[in-house]
Image (tube, rainbow, N blue to C red):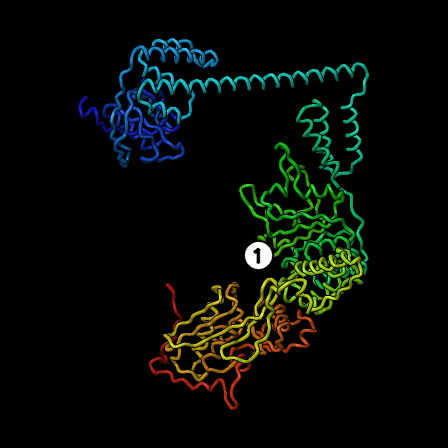
Amino acid sequence: MSNSEQRLCLPLLPLKDVVVFPHMVVPLFVGRSKSVNALSNAMNLDKRVLLTTQKNAGIDSPGEKDIYGIGTIGTVLQLLRLPDGTVKALVEGKKRARITRFTDKEKYVLVEIEPIAEPEVAKAESEAISRTVVGMFGEYAKINKNISKDLVNNISAIRDVSQLADTVAAHFNFKIQDKQRLLETVPPMERMTLLFQLMQAEIEIYKTEQKIKERVKKQMGKTQRDYYLNEQIRAIQKEMGTKDDYKSELDELETRIKRKRMSKEAAAKVRQEFKKLKLMAPMSAEGTVVRNYIEWFINLPWFERSKLQTDIDKAEAILEEDHHGLEKPKERILEYLAVQKLVKKIRGPILCFVGPPGVGKTSLAKSVARATGRALVRISLGGVRDEAEIRGHRRTYIGAMPGKIIQSLKKVKVNNPVFCLDEVDKMSMDFRGDPSAALLEVLDPEQNFGFNDHYLDVDYDLSDILFITTANNLHEIPLPLQDRMETIRLPGYTEYEKLQIANGFLVPKQTEMNGLSKENIQFTKNAIRTIIRRYTREAGVRNLEREIASVCRKIARKVAKEDGKTYVKITAQSIQKYLGVPRFRYGQVEEKDEIGLATGLAWTHVGGELLAIETVIMPGRGKLTVTGKLGEVMQESARAALSYVRSRAERLGLKKHFYKGVDIHVHVPEGATPKDGPSAGITMATSIVSALIKRPVRRDLAMTGEITLRGRILPIGGLKEKILAAHRGGIFQIIIPDENSKDLKEIPGKILNQVEVITASHMDDVLSRAIILLPGETLLKEEQDKIIPPELIPREKEAIRPFQVN
């Protein structure tokens, strides 16, 4: 063997899900550009390529590690280019070869290979194994009709044991890994032994598959036979005068259709479907689908209504009995009842209750149903991501059903219930559609009189329904959907309101649920106030109810042991015995006036909080450091506050370039809690000024407001919660932006009587009230008149032109 024959460089043709053996002719469809280029290159030279199999068929551009190291040298017999750009090639395997070097060129892959020589085999030994393999192939041909007698004869005539092994392996449906093992097994006797084992396993699998197919075929024949016999029995019963059950069912269904009052469109649709049903075979699948479709029409409440409650005083009493506070939603419901009483036909309103968890949004919907005399339907939309949940599936699908709107109306059996769509802000969307878009028609008073469910495919009137949706975050509801609803915000309860709810609702409820009575347990007001302040931090009352229930269970255990003779009075001092160590720090006023420490007010989803802001001044180079896990807006507020202080440096008695020799560090404690928003701007400015001029800030004064670079104070949100937090923490003077004075109407009168609210429009006013000065000292010095240099004064004849942007 010459050296050139030992080492060859051939184009590589990687194959997917096929192994080409020597002596095997196989057609290949080639579509990858590198593979097409490899074939073209081979045709231009000696028509030879190396055929190797990919380890993973899913890889489009295989590298050296993605193909097996042993393949087959093949000759391209024919090449045909197809119109779609792919190539059909007819190749013949010649000889095994091993890849020694892999070169990835730009257009195709070139490999250096070493042909593999096969060892000689003893004639007697090879004859024995050849007969065994040929005999087993003949057995396989008997059970597999796809193998012809000519093929068996051709294989029987092969005398070369290596060629026999490769030819037989090519005609079996082995796994790719097993075929590659056969290709890589070079000694013919070892290859024949491995082939024999694989053939045995394959023949057993094939026989088992044939048995399963025969069994299924017999079962199908039995089913058809049973159906034929059932039809014969039915025909015999009809001839003998036996009552035809199917006909009686159809007669009963027809009677129900005639009695049911529907819309004209629905009645016409049902009559049309019933005609089709009468022509169908009783046992047919289509007949069952049509029957279910007609049943939905019959069971829906087309004109059935609840008798509405129009007594406004009674409705108001029910709403007050169920919920404390919540004046705005109660007022809106009573307005609706008043209009309904005056106008006979009124479209149901579409309300959206928005508020934090636990404030009573869903329970308020139940109270509205009770107050108006309507039935209640509740659908939770949390996690719904399929449009068909709202509109239903079309009848063409197996197991199709109407959407949840129509399903719920069938259950409630009236067409004017209170429909509570809970957690409308928790819907999501995916490839199946957007359920919030499907709700646009449902919640639009101008469209929902003709709601079209995909399953029914007829218009249904939803205009008499009183829709109430609930949400925690309004900004997560799509704007077009928000536009269709009347939004009513339910703010968090104040401490006073929580106290009233606990005494009037929660304590009696949990006392009864835990088998106790007033003779066993009593909560003092201070005990409940301690639970609210130290053991819960929420806008609603869910956790408050849980803590009260926890105390009741511990008392119930004690009562059960002592046969009901126990009486326990729960006080603020004893509450720790039942609930353990307090979980939350209650905001309180600082003990003394300090330099660089100002008290701000923050809004959270569980109510207002006191916010201490600290500033220290250190020698440095003018660096401002802000810490306390602050968001971007709050960090920008700190920079704006410092810029204001620098602009007021001379009036504050500071050197013009005071900031160049110091570093300023502003910190907001409770660093693990994220904080953001612009409303701490004036508090930061006060803290910075206090630290710079070394004068303390009043500890009994809290403030909130956004600061501008000119020192103006802009309005903020959450004023009610912030003032309540200040009152709760023992602070009775609060500075708020002048533009927020209109929001004081929402603050309870009891709170405003105990708190002095000061409005301010400029930062100078805040500093004059917040900073404690020495006797005879003034904070803001008179500003000196500034002299404008002559070169900056425009000449009389020269007009001042506005800036132009090209």
Q: Secondary structure at mark 1?
A: helix
Q: Which residue is mark 1?
A: 475
Which is more toward the observer, 789 or 81?
A: 81
Q: Is residue 765 left or right of residue 35?
A: right
Q: Is residue 464 left or right of residue 614?
A: right
Report x, y in % for residue 806.
37, 63
Residue at 79 percent across and 47 percent down: it is: 306
Q: Is residue 655 left or right of residue 490?
A: left
Report x, y in % for residue 144.
47, 14
Report x, y in % for residue 678.
52, 68
Which is more toward the observer, 43 or 6?
A: 6
* Residue 700 vertical placement versus 542 (above, below): below
Residue at 62 percent across and 70 percent down: it is: 725
Residue 512 visible here: no
Report x, y in % for residue 594.
52, 79
Amino acid of disc 1: His
Instruction: Classify residue 146 by image quadrant.
Output: top left
* Residue 16 vertical placement versus 720 (above, below): above
Which is more toward the observer, 20 or 757?
A: 20
